[in-house]
Image (cartoon, rainbow, N blue to C red):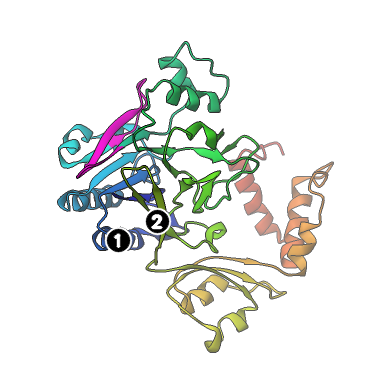
């Protein structure tokens, strides 16, 4: 029995000013090719299906295309919501979808959603744990002792009668940590002491009852604690922090003896995301230009700020997302102790110093008036200031 584990599709996402619809359509077709070539029986989608709670028309169209394409192939789909998804919108039509072997869980209602997948003599129980909050679990399981997010997830699992003689697979969207360290992050998620992307940590051992755990939420593909507890990662690079990720999806093979094999199937994007660094003249020299259609983050080491650097760059790399600088001026700014920089300083002094550090010249009065106006709109300055 073969299962394809994907997650964090973030349909409808943009990269800087660039709409990724074309790239995501290319990705979904690539996933369908894998389904066909590898004779996949079911697809596990581990949350963050959409990038926003209110998805765009293009995003909903892409999901409809993907799900209907799987249904036509008689491939079963098991999908949960993530913290980026709207429960109601993702769950819309779920009862109708089940007749086409599309199973969706977006809300915890006191029981862990379960379906049994059969292929010949082989069976696997698929459990779906959508993104859930501790308060929701307390509501349905008032007798459980829940003092942390980890307690809440353990209570959900402990409340179920899981037959350990059967092959049990869980699809979940959580921040899961290993024995002594956190997972390697990627994407827009930032690591806090207790949470990532406002999702609190849980220990991987709470999933010991499951033969494979298909995780979503972290964008870097990796196992957590044991090889059968795994993040598929986002199939596309969605931020600079993912630039060195080797993107893949997980192909899971399970048999009647509960043996689990994990194979990483590489994903090739329509356009890669790359970070290049150097002087503008060198980066754009004809001999150094490669894959000009890629998404580009450029760090310029030129000492002087280059007028309309983005416009210049996009003549060669039309999908340049962002340009920043790494030179003596920016390094000097990094050395400044910002904790005391505003003590007894006026707004004009702070802005003047900042302008001087960045541009090596004085700000004009006209420019200062613009900064004051913006600061007032933002509530930083008041009319009397």
Q: Position of residue 196 (x, y in %)?
A: 56, 40
Q: Is residue 199 above or below residue 305?
A: above
- Residue at 66% across, 58% down: 366
Label 1 sits on a secondary structure element that is helix
Q: Which residue is mark 2?
A: 249
- Residue found at the far top of this picture: 143
Highlighted magenta segment, given as a residue range: 104-124
Total numbered circles: 2
Is 51 left, or right, of 180 in this rendering?
left
- Residue at 25% across, 57% down: 39
Q: Quadrant of residue 85?
A: top left
Q: Position of residue 194 (x, y in %)?
A: 62, 34
108 in magenta: yes
161 in magenta: no
Label 2 sits on a secondary structure element that is strand
Is 98 left, or right, of 227 in this rendering?
left
**Between marks 1 and 2, how big is the CA–CA gap?**
10 Å
Q: Which residue is mark 1?
A: 34
Residue 234 appears in the picture as rendered: yes
Q: Is residue 178 above or below residue 318?
A: above
**369 or 349, which is in the foreground?**
349
């Amino acid at each position: 029995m073969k299962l394809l584990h994907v997650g964090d599709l973030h349909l409808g996402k943009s990269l800087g000013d660039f709409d990724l619809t074309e790239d995501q359509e290319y990705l979904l077709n690539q996933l369908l090719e894998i389904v066909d070539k590898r004779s996949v029986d079911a697809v596990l989608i581990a949350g963050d299906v959409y990038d926003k709670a209110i998805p765009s028309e293009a995003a909903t169209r892409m999901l409809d295309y993907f799900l209907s394409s799987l249904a036509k192939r008689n491939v079963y789909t098991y999908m949960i919501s993530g913290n980026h998804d709207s429960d109601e919108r993702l769950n819309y039509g779920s009862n109708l979808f089940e007749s086409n072997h599309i199973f969706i869980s977006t809300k915890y209602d006191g029981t862990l959603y379960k379906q049994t997948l059969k292929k010949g003599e082989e069976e696997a129980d698929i459990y779906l744990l959508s993104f859930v909050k501790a308060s929701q679990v307390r509501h349905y399981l008032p007798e459980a002792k829940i003092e942390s997010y980890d307690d809440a997830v353990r209570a959900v699992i402990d409340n179920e009668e899981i037959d350990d003689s059967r092959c049990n697979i869980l699809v979940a969207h959580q921040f899961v940590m290993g024995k002594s360290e956190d997972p390697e992050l990627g994407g827009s998620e930032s690591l806090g002491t207790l949470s990532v992307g406002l999702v609190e940590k849980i220990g991987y051992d709470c999933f010991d009852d499951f033969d494979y755990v298909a995780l979503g939420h972290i964008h870097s593909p990796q196992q957590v604690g044991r090889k059968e507890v795994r993040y598929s990662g986002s199939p596309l690079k969605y931020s600079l922090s993912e630039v060195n990720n080797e993107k893949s999806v997980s192909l899971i093979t399970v048999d009647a003896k509960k043996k689990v094999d994990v194979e990483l199937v590489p994903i090739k994007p329509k356009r890669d995301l790359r970070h290049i660094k150097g002087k503008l003249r060198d980066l754009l020299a004809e001999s150094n230009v490669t894959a000009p259609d890629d998404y580009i983050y450029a760090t310029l080491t030129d000492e002087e700020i280059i007028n309309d650097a983005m416009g210049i760059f996009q003549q060669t790399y039309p999908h340049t997302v962002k340009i920043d600088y790494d030179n003596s001026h920016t390094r000097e700014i990094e050395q400044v102790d910002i904790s005391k920089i505003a003590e007894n300083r006026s707004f004009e002094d702070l802005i003047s110093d900042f302008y001087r550090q960045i541009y090596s010249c004085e700000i004009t009065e006209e420019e200062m008036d613009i900064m004051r106006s913006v600061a007032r709109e933002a509530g930083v300055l008041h009319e009397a200031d």
